[in-house]
């Protein structure tokens, strides 16, 4: 079993070297860049000569394009702010020696480093992700955000962690949340969904309580409180933006 590793990038010079270094077990590494203006491509060249430049078509589309460039059918996808832990790398090396795989994909827990600590609860861990899959039986889906691999066939679970070095501080978290809620609201609007008063006014509070209390966010200390607060704000912004988009759509039809 040979594995092609893929990464999509845009201005990832701060993260990319460590991400690529954690892929030293892969049979090839493919980087698809969206015209970075920093040293991303130069850093990528230190690890692979299979670098492709393509205008940004969306998360799922870019990852599918990266998959198409792979030499091997088994593909492992890694984001630039992620790392393959030593335990996970050991499992992947063992898989490469296996003669009978018997499944279409593998999922693994993702552990997040946030505000100075590894998050163990808050709905963030274990956050199982399908990242190793047979491309003849799976592909990336998702119009705007929350892209994921959809596979035809069985999925097996690995035990090693995929390490995620997410936002570096609260400001970056806030900026990313603003961008993602815009994309999420646009996707919901295209599916003709609407935001009710309950969704805008009550759902954020319910999200906070679910994250902080029922998903044990309080055990993650102050970062757990921040996660719950941002989760609530995400729901509020997404639904408020969806309400705005629906109002604009109604106004355009009226005119």
Image (cartoon, helix red, strand yellow):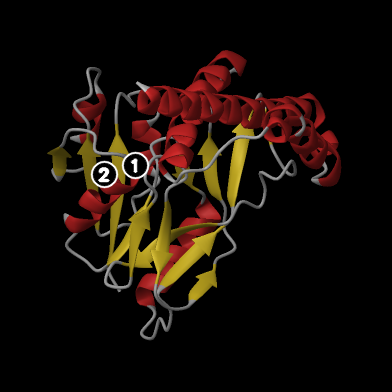
Foreground residue, 3 or 204? 204
Picture residue at 21% right of the left edge, 66% below the top: 72
- Visible residue check, residue 46: no
In the rendering, at what x and y percent does residue 220 appear?
79, 35
Q: Secondary structure at mark 2?
A: helix
Q: Please identify the quarter of the rendering in which residue 80 is found.
A: top left
Foreground residue, 254 or 85? 254
Q: Please identify the quarter of the rendering in which residue 251 is found.
A: top left
> If the image is split into quadrants, where does the C terminus sit?
top left
Apparent side of residue 91 relative to residue 124 in the rendered image (left or right): left
In the rendering, at what x and y percent does residue 16 appear?
35, 32
Residue 88, compared with residue 215, is above or below; it is below
For label 1, the residue is 59
Residue 39, compared with residue 153, is above or below; it is above
Q: Secondary structure at mark 1?
A: helix
* Tag shown at residue 165: none
* Mark 1: few/some/many CA within 10 Å (<14, 14-19, 20+): some
Residue 125, compared with residue 117, is above or below; it is below
**How far apart are the two marked residues, 2 and 1, measured between alpha carbons?**
5 Å
Foreground residue, 153 or 95? 153
- Visible residue check, residue 97: yes
In the rendering, at what x and y percent does residue 117 appear?
69, 31
For label 2, the residue is 62
Picture residue at 61% right of the left edge, 45% below the top: 111
> Do callouts 2 and 1 mark residues in contact (Cβ within 8 Å)?
yes
Apparent side of residue 58 relative to residue 117 in the rendered image (left or right): left
């Amino acid at each position: 079993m040979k594995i092609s590793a893929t990464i999509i990038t845009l201005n990832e010079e701060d993260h990319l070297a460590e991400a690529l270094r954690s892929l030293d077990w892969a049979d090839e590494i493919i980087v698809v860049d969206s015209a970075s203006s920093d040293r991303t491509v130069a850093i990528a060249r230190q690890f692979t000569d299979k670098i492709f430049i393509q205008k940004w078509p969306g998360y799922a589309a870019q990852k599918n394009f990266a998959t198409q460039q792979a030499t091997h059918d088994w593909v492992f996808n890694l984001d630039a702010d992620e790392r393959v832990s030593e335990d996970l790398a050991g499992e992947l090396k063992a898989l490469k020696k296996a003669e009978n795989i018997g499944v279409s994909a593998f999922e693994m827990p993702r552990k997040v480093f946030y505000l100075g600590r590894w998050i163990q609860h808050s709905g963030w861990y274990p956050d199982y992700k399908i990242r190793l899959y047979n491309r003849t039986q799976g592909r990336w889906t998702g119009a705007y955000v929350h892209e994921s691999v959809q596979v035809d066939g069985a999925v097996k679970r690995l035990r090693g962690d995929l390490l995620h070095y997410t936002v570096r501080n609260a400001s970056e978290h806030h900026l990313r949340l603003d961008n993602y809620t815009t994309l999420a609201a646009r996707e919901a609007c295209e599916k003709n969904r609407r935001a009710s008063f309950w969704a805008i006014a009550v759902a954020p509070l319910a999200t906070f309580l679910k994250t902080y209390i029922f998903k044990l966010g309080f055990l993650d200390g102050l970062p757990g409180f921040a996660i719950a607060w941002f989760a609530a704000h995400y729901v509020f912004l997404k639904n408020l933006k969806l309400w705005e988009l629906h109002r604009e759509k109604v106004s355009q039809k009226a005119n």
